[in-house]
Every structure is written in C-alpha cells, then in structure tokens.
Image: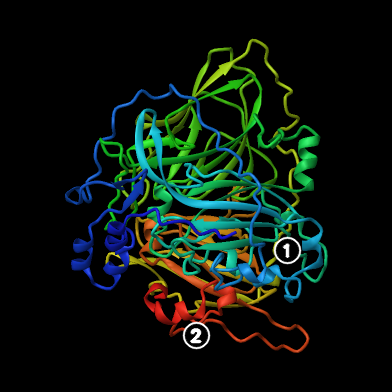
C-alpha cells in the first residue's frame, strides 16, 4: 500500500512557492524573485485556495488582533497519536530509499546488521505510527477559522506516547508543497531520523523516522545511562529555511516519554499517572504556550522578510487563545513548553500557588525544587507540580507572563503592570486533597550522572553574532556541506557559547546529546539548569560553558538558535560525529567534504539522482 496521495496544493502555490522559501532568494540576492512570487503561501483547503498570511503591502506591520472574549473555552487536550499499520513494512525493500512508497527510506541503524544496532533495541516489537502533514483549518480564536498546516490535520499535532526500550517508526507523509523535516526535540536518535534541515521529506513523499528509544550506555560499560531517559519532548518541523514558517503555521506537538524509573514514581504517588487508557492522564497536563499573529480576517500574519523574530498579538495555550482550565483542589503536573518563534516568557501565577519544578527541558531534575516562576526562551520546557488544594472552590488564578517584549531582539525585562495572562484556572470542588501527591522540595526524582572536567578532551568556542542584518556563528553563515565540529564518538567536549550580538537573545539548541551547563558568565549554573538541558538561554552579552558526551550515533547533526527566524537566516552550525576504533585508532572517513552535499543516500534519505540534479536544495 503506497503512502502517495493526490497533490493538495494548487498549481498556483507550486509556482509561487511560499513566503519562507523566498528566504533562499534573499540569501541569493533575488529580491525581484520574491516580489514576483508573492510574499505569502497559498494552500488549497476544501477546494479553495487560501492565502496564509496577509496582503504583501502589510509586510512588517503586525495587525491588531480580532476581538474575542478570553477565558470562556476550556483548554484543549491534544489527542494521542494512535498506532497504525504501515504498508509496505518499514525497512523492507519496498520501503527503502528511492522506493515509490517511501522515497526517503529508513535509518540504516534500523537494520540488525548495522554495527551500531544493539541487541537490546529488539526486546520489544516496534510501535508504528503515521503522521501526515496536511493543510487544515484551525480555530485559535473560537468561531474564527484560520488556515493552517497540521500534523494529521490538527493544531497542535497529536501527542506521541513513547516508552523506553520500545522502538518506534513514525512514517511521515508530506501532503503540502513545501519540503519538511521532522525533529524530535530532545531525542537521542540516528542522523537520518534526527530532523536534519537538509534531510528533507519532499512534497507528496514519505520518510520512515526510526527512533530506537534506547538510552546511551555508561562510559566503558554495557549498562544504560538511566540519567538520560527523557520525559517531556516535543516534535516540530525543521526544514531548511522554512522552520519558522512551518512551526508558526501549526507543525508542532508533544512527545511524552516514560521509563521504569518514572513509572515507579507514578506508582509511589510522587507523580500523577501519565495515562488514562489511550488518553493523557487528567492530572498530567502538557501546555504549549505560543503568541500567534492573527489578522482581522482570521488568517495568520506572516512576514517572510522578518529576520529578527516574529512577535504575535494573540496568546494561545494548546492552540487556543487565552482559554480556561478547570482544576480540582489537588496537585497537578504542568508540562510547560515555550512554543513561540521569538518571545521569551517569564511565567508565574497571579496567586501564591505552591509550585515545585521537577523537570528542565526533556529530563526530570535530580530532585524537586520550590520555585515561584520560570523564564523560558523559545523551545525550553519546565515541568511543574502545582498545588491548588488550599484554594476555595470558585477561586480564579491566572497563569501569566510578566516579561515585556516588543520585537525579536529579546525581552526588555520584567514588567508586572504589563502582565499578560495566558490562561485562567478555575478551582472547583468543596473537598481539598492536600495529600494527592507525595512530593515536596528535595524529593529525589532522577539520578544525575555528572560529566567531570578531567574527562574533557576537546574545547570549542562558538560566537553567536549579527552580520549584514542576518545571523552568523563564528562569523559564518550555515553551510550544509561544511563540518564545523569534527567529533569522535565517545568523546567528552567542553563548549563555550558566547553571545556577542549586544541586546539580541539566542536560545541555543544542540541536537543529539544533552548538555550539562557549568557556568553562566563565570558563575555556577542556576540550580534548575545544573543537570541536563537541550536548549540553553544565551541572553545579550552572555557566555555559557557546558560539557557534552557524544555516544551511540554517528553522522551529521546540527545546533542552532531556536529563535527560528534566526535559524532560517543561517544561525546554525553542523557537527559530524565519527566512529573511532579505540583499539586501532582508525576513524571512519568524513561524510562532509565542505564543498558540496556528499551525504550517502542511506544516511540522508535522499536518492543520489536527486542530490545530483537538485543541488540548489542542499546549499
């Protein structure tokens, strides 16, 4: 059974490309081509061609938001992604790279004969899922239709449920006329399935993303490193030059991961249950916070020439503008994700709600920490236990942002009078449940395996700067053919990230591995950052030092600013992890040659004849 389907995008859209793809024309000096193509993408939804964005004459001018009554609709809970039967079978000849059904194939590490493939990856039958990128209509504001792009037609996308030790294959089918790339943010995955920006899934084609969902091993051991088991991940588009556009238009969702340790915390009543059958547990609430930019007619405003970072005019939770959440008088788990393109938020409650932070980014902390709020740059997550048991029935509490920001440069600072509520929380129930969870500050959660300075063998520095109105790292724009960090598998490295771009902020996301922040501007890392992170806040004139250990997978991976407008304007670097035989000292030859795209088809998922004939897509 082929995953093909008729094109859903109009031929007009195919000719005009779209607003974000015109970034390539910007980089090549083709402003005339931009104006000729039109600034805003067009999608075919239910037979109608709809422009995603606004009139090109409005470029650079954020419109006033449509009027709506906030806090009247219950916050939506994204559905779980249901298992699917994938035909032809993943890894079969009929689904290999270059095939008609799955043009982009599957990671070579999927096959048992691959030298990286471990026996413990095969203890459980892989879970199979189908994820389709589709044009859709979504209501960010109740009653107002907004043309969007959705995974399986919904915004945010369906939540993926993953289990440590059980591999999964996500077959992504691209039904829009834009290249796409699926990135599971915070995962430890093969290069082919990591969402490398140039490892595309082309329009009307499919790619099998293979996730072993296995932990890296302890140094010099066959014992899995349980400190690396993730908890709250998310997935989003990562296509080259189009990431900001695609994520802003709907291509993002949660991935919730558990292992035996976290299940034990649930069984011990330290954490609430993640599952209620095939749905998310009622007391475990993932919340993605976004500032959407919505025109008066309901369409999404998008300026493809914005290099700085889009700031929105409507504050959404799980895809709905300023909803309400009805809670019982008990403790809840809130998984908070900053899904904004450029906005930095500082979240707090309008009342003094007892709050424990239990996770940072993808991982549980070593122990619960009492907090009164949290600052989150784009892509960062904070995992909270919040206690509503002491509040009388009918109490209204607001989850609010007190960080002022008016443009993509970065926040201006805390401004309590200008606070904006993302969500209203309404307490219900006459009987409090103060003992609903057995957790307090200091409660142990996940053991932390620290990397020590004497293990470091390589030190690298990366300077994040502004150049010619765009964004560079170490003075260079992103080049997908160039290796910016040649890394030996198994090595421990110290990276120094320095922001020399003045008041501009850059949240830096590093693929493949967690990193352990050592210092911020020479001082010890804050307690909530001192274990593991996958995204690091790099404020204006800030220097961060971190340690990383590179394990399991080889090949090209990227790191970049997660203000996705900055990423699309080339604030990105590429590392190549290479196998190094500890006995002979022999290293695998490099895949990157620095001159042209030279990644083997089984690694990048692009048939060689396409690489040869469509070279402009890989530059």
Looking at the rendering, which quadrant does residue 124 occupy? bottom right
Crowd rating for badge 2 (residues with CA inside 10 Å; few <14, some 14–19, many 20+): few
Which of the numbered marks, if any, corresponds to residue 352? none
Of badges 1 and 2, the one in the foreground is: 2
Most distant residue in the front direction: 1
Way the structure is coloured? rainbow
Image-quadrant location for residue 172: bottom right
Quadrant showing the N terminus: bottom right
Where does label 1 land, which residue? 216
Picture layout, residue 573 above or below residue 233: below
Label 1 CA crowd tier, 10 Å (few <14, some 14–19, many 20+): many
Give me the residue at 42% from left, 46% from top.
344
- Would you say 227 lies left or right of 525 here? right
Count of numbered circles on the image: 2
User: As drawn, is 297 to the left or to the right of 607?
Assistant: left
Quadrant position of residue 368: top right
State the image coordinates of residue 142 (x, y, percent, origin top left): 39, 28
Would residue 567 be found to the left or right of residue 264 on screen?
Answer: left
Nearer to me, 160 or 43: 43
Separation of disc 1 and disc 2 at Cα? 28 Å
- Residue 227 horizontal/vertical position (percent): 73, 54
Q: Position of residue 381 (x, y in %)?
A: 55, 46
Q: Mark 2 — residue?
A: 593
Q: Is residue 613 in view? A: yes
Secondary structure at numbered mark 1: loop
């Amino acid at each position: 059974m082929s995953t093909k389907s008729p094109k859903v995008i109009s031929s007009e859209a195919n000719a005009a490309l779209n607003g974000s793809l015109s970034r390539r024309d910007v980089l090549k000096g083709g402003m005339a081509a931009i104006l000729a193509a039109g600034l805003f993408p067009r999608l075919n939804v239910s037979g109608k061609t709809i422009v995603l964005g606004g009139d090109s004459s409005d470029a650079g001018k954020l419109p006033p938001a449509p009027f709506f009554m906030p806090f009247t609709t219950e916050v939506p809970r994204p559905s779980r992604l249901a298992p699917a039967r994938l035909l032809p079978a993943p890894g079969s000849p009929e689904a290999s790279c270059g095939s008609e059904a799955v043009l982009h194939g599957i990671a070579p590490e999927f096959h048992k004969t691959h030298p990286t493939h471990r026996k413990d990856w095969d203890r459980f039958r892989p879970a199979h899922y189908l994820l389709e990128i589709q044009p859709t209509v979504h209501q960010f504001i109740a009653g107002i239709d907004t043309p969007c792009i959705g995974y399986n037609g919904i915004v945010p996308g369906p939540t993926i449920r993953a289990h440590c030790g059980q591999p999964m294959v996500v077959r992504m089918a691209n039904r829009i006329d834009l290249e796409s790339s699926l990135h599971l943010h915070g995962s430890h995955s093969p290069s082919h399935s990591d969402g490398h920006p140039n490892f595309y899934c082309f329009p009307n084609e499919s790619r099998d993303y293979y996730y072993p969902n296995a932990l890296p091993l302890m140094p010099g051991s066959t014992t899995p490193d349980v400190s690396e088991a993730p908890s709250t991940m998310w997935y989003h588009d990562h296509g080259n030059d189009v990431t900001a556009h695609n994520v802003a238009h709907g291509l993002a969702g949660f991935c919730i991961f558990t292992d035996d340790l976290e299940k034990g915390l649930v069984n011990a009543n330290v954490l609430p249950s993640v599952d209620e059958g095939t749905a998310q547990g009622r007391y475990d609430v993932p919340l993605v916070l976004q500032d959407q930019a919505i025109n008066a007619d309901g369409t999404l405003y998008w300026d493809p020439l914005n290099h700085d970072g889009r700031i929105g005019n409507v504050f959404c939770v799980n895809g709905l503008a300023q909803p309400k959440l009805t809670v019982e008088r008990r403790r809840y788990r809130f998984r908070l994700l900053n899904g904004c393109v450029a906005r930095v938020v500082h979240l707090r409650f309008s009342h003094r709600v007892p709050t424990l932070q239990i996770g940072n980014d993808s991982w549980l902390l070593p122990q619960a920490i009492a907090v009164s709020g949290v600052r989150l740059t784009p892509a960062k997550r904070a995992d909270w236990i919040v206690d509503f048991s002491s509040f009388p029935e009918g109490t209204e509490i607001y989850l609010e942002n007190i960080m002022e920001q008016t443009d993509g440069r970065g926040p201006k600072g805390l401004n309590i009078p200008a606070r904006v509520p993302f969500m209203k929380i309404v307490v219900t129930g006459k009987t409090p449940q103060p003992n609903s969870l057995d957790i307090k500050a200091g409660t142990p959660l996940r053991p932390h395996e620290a990397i020590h300075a004497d293990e470091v063998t390589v030190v690298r520095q990366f300077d994040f700067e502004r150049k010619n109105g765009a964004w560079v790292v170490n003075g260079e724009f992103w080049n997908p053919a160039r290796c910016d960090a040649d890394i030996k598998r198994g090595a421990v490295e110290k990276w120094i990230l320095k922001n020399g771009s003045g008041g501009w902020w850059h949240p830096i996301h590093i693929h493949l591995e967690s990193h352990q922040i050592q210092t911020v501007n020479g001082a010890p890392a804050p307690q909530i950052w001192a274990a593991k992170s996958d995204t690091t806040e790099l404020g204006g004139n800030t220097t961060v030092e971190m340690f990383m250990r590179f394990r399991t997978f080889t090949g090209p991976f990227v790191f970049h600013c997660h203000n996705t407008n900055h990423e699309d304007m080339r604030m990105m670097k590429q590392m190549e992890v290479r196998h190094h035989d500890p006995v002979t000292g022999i290293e695998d030859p490099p895949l990157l040659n620095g001159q042209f795209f030279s990644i083997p088809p089984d690694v990048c998922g692009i048939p060689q004849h396409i690489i040869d004939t469509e070279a402009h897509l890989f530059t």
